Amino acid sequence: MRAILVASSILFVVSQAGAQPSRDHLEAMRHLRLGQENMHAEQWDKAAAEFQAAIKLEPTLEMAHYGLGQVYMATKKFPAAVTAYLACRDAVAANGAKRATNDQEAQRQLDDQIRSLEEEKTLLVSGRVTAMLSGGPVDLDRRIQDLKSRRFRNEKTVPETPAWISIALGSAYFRSGAMPDAEREYLAAIKADPRLGEAHNNLAVVYMLTQRYAEANSEIKAAEKSGFRVNPQLKEDLKKASARN
């Protein structure tokens, strides 16, 4: 699989129109793909090292920061995951500013990341690798569609934070025990995409744990309306908590 990922990366970036990609970019993309491969194999230390190597070569490589955050979430290093996801958010803003000036390198980086995520999804769907983290193909689709939408966006101002970053940040804050921060990020995710059932569901959990039962119930209804399957245990827990109070 490593040969497939790395070879396709090199073939893709070399075929891009315009100036040839820099050596650093080629190497950063290679490390990104190796990070994705090791992550799905649950080789967490190797995955983190590959994502960090990619970031060192190309600090604005969004998916390397995101991948690092995923590794830290899987290994329960939640404050480190927060830091990684914040860096991902900063990279998105920086890249948006670059593309507003028609920066070729920024556009190439965007296209190559789309390609890497599509390859990762193909491997997941085919069963050649396993989704070891929450989200799986759904999370990949969310990121792919966002990156594709930015291909043609004329970003003259700082872009809105994509929902997939806000929901990841919310989860990292939640696991760190920072409820107000988690709430803020889940609300930001809903603002970016009101139909995001996962964000409504997670916000319901925050509201329940902070004894705002009516708000929690409203968010569960919003999650289900969006088509998200809410865990019956959450609804039962909310019902019991409400009855006690």
Image (cartoon, grey):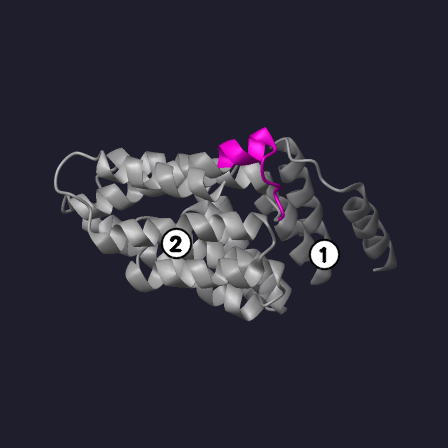
Residue occupying the point 41% across, 55% down: 64
Task: From the image, tell me which residue sits under label 1.
Answer: 208
Q: Is residue 211 visible?
A: no
Q: Regarding mark 2 in the picture, which secondary structure is present there? A: helix
Q: Position of residue 34 (x, y in %)?
A: 45, 51
153 or 121: which is nearer to us?
A: 121
Residue 196 sits in which quadrant?
Answer: top right
149 with respect to 177 (left or right): left
Number of residue marks: 2
- Residue interval drawn in magenta: 121-132
| Amino acid found under the numbered disc labelled 2 | His
40 or 91: which is nearer to us?
A: 40
Residue 138 highlighted magenta (yes or no) = no
Residues at marks 2 and 1 touching, judged by CB atoms closer than 8 Å: no
Which part of the image, by quadrant, shows the C terminus? bottom right
Q: Position of residue 32 (x, y in %)?
A: 40, 51
Q: Position of residue 80 (x, y in %)?
A: 51, 69
Residue occupying the point 55% across, 58% down: 71
Q: Regarding mark 1 in the picture, which secondary structure is present there? A: helix
Q: Is residue 160 above or below residue 11?
A: below
| Amino acid found under the numbered disc labelled 1 | Met
187 with respect to 7 (left or right): right
Q: Residues within 10 Å of mark 2 (few under 14, many from 20)?
A: many
Q: Is residue 9 above or below residue 28?
A: above
Which labelled disc corresponds to residue 18? Answer: none
Q: CA distance from mark 2 to mark 1?
A: 41 Å
Task: From the image, tell me which residue sits under label 2.
Answer: 31
